[in-house]
């Protein structure tokens, strides 16, 4: 399957303006969030033989990406989310079977997350697939702490026995009546900000109206569920690597510490 990895990047985030250009420190120096996500995309692209582009409507982001050697596809300011931006790229680059949406705030995404997703799509599981990562007690506690502090943090997912998504939420679901030790596996799955779409299934997405659940949660994947389309959840393994996304400015030191941790692994 001919695959294109697209990194949607917008400047005008309501919670974190100019987020793609935020500075993120690591053992390799200080780089922007979009540059670090670009590097994650390249690592995955090398593994699966895919091209990588950044999709943006902002000239500042475009100039920055081109400055570090990245490829840019300009999209419209009317795109309401990353999936609509990916649909625009698919319309411009119509010779791909599969579009992977690597969200621009996920620089800690290991390449095998994308490889596992593409492998699942090759089996014909659905028109859309997305990874989920089982939380240990520490990650579940971090998600709950974000919500108690009033921050919109990571997304969680619940799915059927066959992997079909039932719901995604920025609340921590399912509710668990007790706490877990840091290393204990929990029934909570962290949804990784990553999607793979068949180009045919992606083509319809911008034509559908935004549903009530998508509007309430601000989660783009809910539009597929509200239209009765199957979203397949692929369980992935962290392999000792730490994973978090940059949703708020407070996430930057967390991600910086995780970059250092992950750099020390083989």
Image (spheres, rainbow, N blue to C red):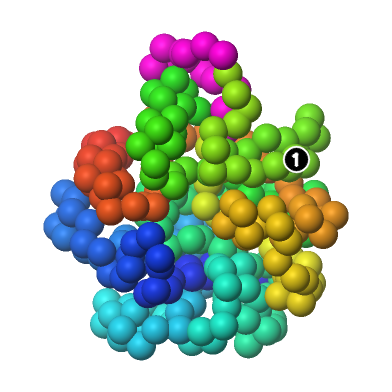
Query: Chief secondary structure of the magenta span?
Result: loop
- Residue 86's x, y, as percent? 60, 73
Position of residue 151 relative to residue 19, above or below, is above
| Helix, strand or loop status at disc 1 | strand
| Image: magenta residue range | 177-189
Q: Is residue 177 left or right of residue 13?
A: right
Residue 260 is situated, as x and y percent measured from the top left of the image, at: 22, 42
- Residue drawn at point x = 39 percent, y = 41 percent: 150
Instruction: Tell me which residue sits at (63%, 87%) in the image.
Output: 92
Which residue is at the front of the view, 94 or 152? 152
Where does residue 35 sit, x and y in percent of width and height?
31, 67
Residue 191, magenta (yes or no): no
Q: Quadrant of residue 56?
A: bottom left
Image: 119 above or below 132:
below
Determine the residue positioned at 16% across, 60% down.
Answer: 30
- Please tell me whether residue 47 is drawn above or below residue 264 in the rendered image: below
Q: Residue 100's x, y, as percent?
A: 59, 63
CA neighbours of label 1 inside 10 A, class few (<14), some (14 to 19), many (20+): some
User: In which quadrant will I find the N terminus?
Assistant: bottom right
Residue 187 vs residue 39: left or right? right
| Residue of label 1 | 166
């Amino acid at each position: 399957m001919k695959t294109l990895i697209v990194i949607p990047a917008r400047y005008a985030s309501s919670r974190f303006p100019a987020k793609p250009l935020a500075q993120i420190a690591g053992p390799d120096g200080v780089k922007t969030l979009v540059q670090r996500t670009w590097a994650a995309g390249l690592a995955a692209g090398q593994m699966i033989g895919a091209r990588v582009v950044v999709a943006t409507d902002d000239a500042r982001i475009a100039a920055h990406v081109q400055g570090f050697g990245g490829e840019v596809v300009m999209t419209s300011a009317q795109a309401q989310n990353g999936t609509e931006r990916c649909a625009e790229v698919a319309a411009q680059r119509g010779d791909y079977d599969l579009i992977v949406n690597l969200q621009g705030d996920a620089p800690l995404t290991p390449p095998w997350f994308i490889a596992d997703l593409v492998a699942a799509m090759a089996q014909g599981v659905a028109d859309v697939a997305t990874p989920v990562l089982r939380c240990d007690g520490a990650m579940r506690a971090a998600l709950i702490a974000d919500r108690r502090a009033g921050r919109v943090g990571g997304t969680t997912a619940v799915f059927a026995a066959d992997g079909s998504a039932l719901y995604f939420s920025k609340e921590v679901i399912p509710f668990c009546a007790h706490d877990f030790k840091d290393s204990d596996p929990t029934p909570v799955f962290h949804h990784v900000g990553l999607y793979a779409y068949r180009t045919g299934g992606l083509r319809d997405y911008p034509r559908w109206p935004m549903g009530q659940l998508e509007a309430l949660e601000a989660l783009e994947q809910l539009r597929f569920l509200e239209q009765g389309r199957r979203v397949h959840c692929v369980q992935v393994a962290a392999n000792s690597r730490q994973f978090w996304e940059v949703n708020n400015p407070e996430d930057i030191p967390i991600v910086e510490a995780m970059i250092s941790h992950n750099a020390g692994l083989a």
